[in-house]
Image (cartoon, grey):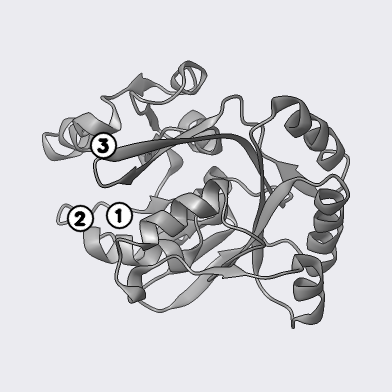
Amino acid sequence: MERGVEVVLTTGRSPASVKNLAEETGADHYIICGNGAIVYDLQKQETIYQNLLDKKKVLQLIEICEENSIYYNVYTENTIITKTLNYNTLFYHHENSRKPDDKKTNIHIVQDIYEYVKEREEEDYSKIMICDDNNIIFSSIIKKIKMVKNVDVLDVGHMSKKIIKDGTEEYPLEYYYTEVSSQNVDKWSAILKLIEKLNIQPEEVIAIGDNVNDQTMLENAGLGIAMGNSAPYIQEMADEVTLDNNSNGVAVSIEKHILTV
């Protein structure tokens, strides 16, 4: 940043969930959240771009999930709305147990998500996450979701694999998932909005990612770098592959392409 490089955390998480990480790392000017649904200026505390799901579309998607008895949760700018702690929300809940109150991801558990959303005033709905550990059930719901007009469905080709640590014990958390957002939401589209504001060119952008929601920025940035722990098909999208997350792959790329130039 001292060299004039903007460092922008670009994530599927909500702004409230990533603000504290941005402050801890010092990358606290702009953040891109909801897989590109929101570009947020932390210093001015304002949204400078958004492409959100409207309330009617959210309710339609909730109905499909409820009719097919599959786990889902709804992301707003500040909160994850869910009925139970499972899959991604279980992971975030465990993360919260090690954080002070002002740095926790806000998870709101409600009995009936459809009625909760229906009765509330208009909110910023960035995405809906759908999860299941049975691939047959999961694939079936994906086909139905893809028939909904004016939404984008993230086509994830692998299971999410996370580890929950409890003292000396480790518990694997594995599940299939997709994320449903408004049409034309992706990380690269959001980056284009930001670099237009910053008056820089796409070829000046370095993107580092490890998942399918990073595809558009890995393929379109001036330099796309995949993490060494990402799936092989993700690595094929990138211009080069760095070390894995446990070997400081991001730092290695920054040293190579920015600090030693």
Amino acid on which the number 3 mark rests in the picture = Val
Quadrant location of the N terminus in the rendered image:
bottom left
Q: Residues within 10 Å of mark 3 (few under 14, many from 20)?
A: many
**Are dots 2 and 1 in contact, CB under 8 Å?**
yes
What kind of element bears circle 3?
A: helix
What kind of element bears circle 1?
A: loop
Amino acid on which the number 2 mark rests in the picture = Met
Amino acid on which the number 1 mark rests in the picture = Glu
Residue under numbered circle 3: 250
- Asked if residue 194 can be seen in this view, the reply is no
**Are dots 2 and 3 in contact, CB under 8 Å?**
no
Q: Residues within 10 Å of mark 1 (few under 14, many from 20)?
A: some
- From the viewer's perspective, is 13 left or right of 23? right
Earlier-in-chain disc, 2 versus 1? 2
Picture quadrant where residue 140 is located: top right
What kind of element bears circle 2?
A: loop
Q: Which residue lies at the image location 42% right of the left edge and 45% below the top edge? A: 201
List x then y, in percent, for residue 240: 35, 20
Residue under numbered circle 2: 1
Q: Nearer the viewer, residue 223 or 119?
A: 119
Residue under numbered circle 1: 6
Task: Look at discs 2 and 3 and give the one toward the viewer.
Answer: 3
- From the viewer's perspective, is 85 left or right of 235? right
Q: Which residue lies at the image location 73% right of the left edge and 78% below the top edge? A: 122
List x then y, in percent, for residue 89: 53, 54
Quadrant location of the C terminus in the rendered image:
top left
